[in-house]
Image (tube, helix red, strand yellow):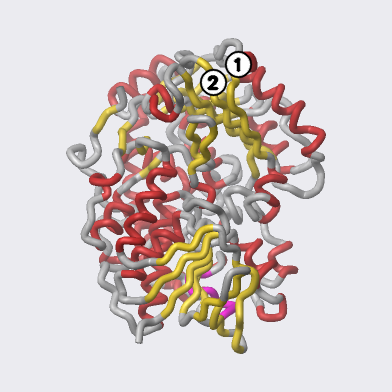
Amino acid sequence: MHRRVVIIGAGPGGLASAILLALTGARVTVLERQQRVGGRSALMEAEGFRFDTGPTFFLYPRILEEIFSAAGRRLSDTVDLIRLDPLYRLVFEGGGDLRVHADPTKLAAEIERFAPGDARNLQRFLADNRAKLQAFRPVLETAFNGPADLLSGPILKALRWLNPHRSVDADLARYFRDPRIRLAFSFQSKYLGMSPFRCPSLFTILSFLEHEHGIFHPRGGCGAVMEAMARLARELGVEIRLGETVRHIDFRGRRAVGVRTGQGEYPCDGLVINADFAKAMATLVPDDLRRRWSDAQIARKKFSCSTFMLYLGIEGKVDELDHHTILLAEDYARNLAEIEACRELPRRPSLYVQNACVTDPELAPPGCSTLYVLVPVGHQRGHIDWAAEAPRYRALVLRRLEALGVRDVERRIRVERTITPVDWADGFNIHRGATFNLAHNLSQMLHNRPRNRFEDLDGVYLVGGGTHPGSGLPVIFEGARISARLLAEDLGLPVPWRGEHGAPGGVLGQAPTKEAYSREAA
């Protein structure tokens, strides 16, 4: 008899798990409450404009390439990945701007122009982080089932690179004296919803991944990758049911044996939860069934920042902006402190803008452009009345766009959508609207994060940014491999892809070849 697996959520982790578990011979059903796949990575469309809801670039595609390869497919046959150069442009409100090139020689010249003397340490930074990544490869590809796992050989070997007393910014100070150059290699900590002044030094590997392996724009947006994954899953026999919200998980003791929606009941031998972790626990699992992750325990955890979003369909081209442009507030430390305190909105916020049509003009009607604007803000604690504040903050953000050189922004808007932390919390079912999940501090990593084989319940497995290894698309795909392997082994199913340490390449392995992914942006 076929083992039955139910997956709650068709986000990137749920889709990756569905593909892998279909290869085991299990009968896989994915239940997604929205009308399209992708979760926070879904496409949003209006009047011919197409926007990514969440992630706007694709980093280190090799993990997903390996998942497609396990199913006998090539990712490059279904998704056109365009490698960007420059990676992005950084605009410092205090003065100056820096184009971050993919070519290390060009990057060093740009750093030397901007901060004489700092360029000589670029190669040392890259070499040290190359070694750090390699040391942590087994860590990010291994399930952590308890504190004893910290005594494993790979972990002990990686400890010399951890430096828990040192933040990302402090670690970068060993290479770069100019604080603006340090920002150029540390703002990526916002991918984790954290400040570089607090984020553990391990995460200097984030900027290294960009420089070593490239940043890609999937033609059609990251949502096009999600749709390609859903097509592959369906080809493998996975049933994906859209517009079907899970209302209840059925338990026999501590074991999940099925789920119920408004449309029916789905018994299961294994349950994968790809929904936001904290929200799913509060709404689907009785508190008395949870030991380590009770409501009281979750309330004591630290969560990432949230984001204020503007999705703008603009008349005309926006030649003033690169594909990715980041405006860094003059008082960046204060900006981050305002976000972390969750007491007020940043007064002069930093912001990120994606002007994707310079690379992919078909995302907008002819002669038009899409602008995706993200402003990091504090997550929801009831401290901000967003119904009142959203119009004021929108006006502030549009003024910041004008400061970047985008002319007549408001007059040119044809399509607009706003998402506030309240919308993330209520519309997207994200706990506190914390778009990057649980914070990635040292006390909430490895075995201290909710585990892939969820420790509080039987027959339940987690995927997504709320579990190990953490947030970010390639890391979520790696987490899906871990969770799918554990589930398959627990049900006595074959594991036809190579797992953990045997994964070909893995999240920290060899870079994709230029031949495979070298369609340069025009």
Determine which quarter of the picture holds residue 377.
Answer: top right
Residue 282: x %, y % from top left: 69, 67
Which image quarter holds the N terminus? Answer: bottom left
Determine which quarter of the picture holds residue 128.
Answer: top left
Reading the image, the residue beneath label 1 is: 409
For the point 78% across and 36% down, the residue is 344
2 and 1 marks in contact (CB < 8 Å): yes
Magenta-colored span: 451-457
Residue 373: x %, y % from top left: 57, 30
- How many neighbours does mark 1 have within 10 angstroms: few (below 14), some (14-19), or many (20 or more)? some
Q: Nearer the viewer, residue 505 or 375?
A: 375
Amino acid beneath label 1: Val
Q: Is residue 387 visible?
A: yes
Q: Earlier in the sequence, mark 2 or mark 1?
A: 2
Reading the image, the residue beneath label 2 is: 314
Which image quarter holds the C terminus? Answer: top left
Amino acid beneath label 2: Ile
Q: Is residue 452 magenta?
A: yes
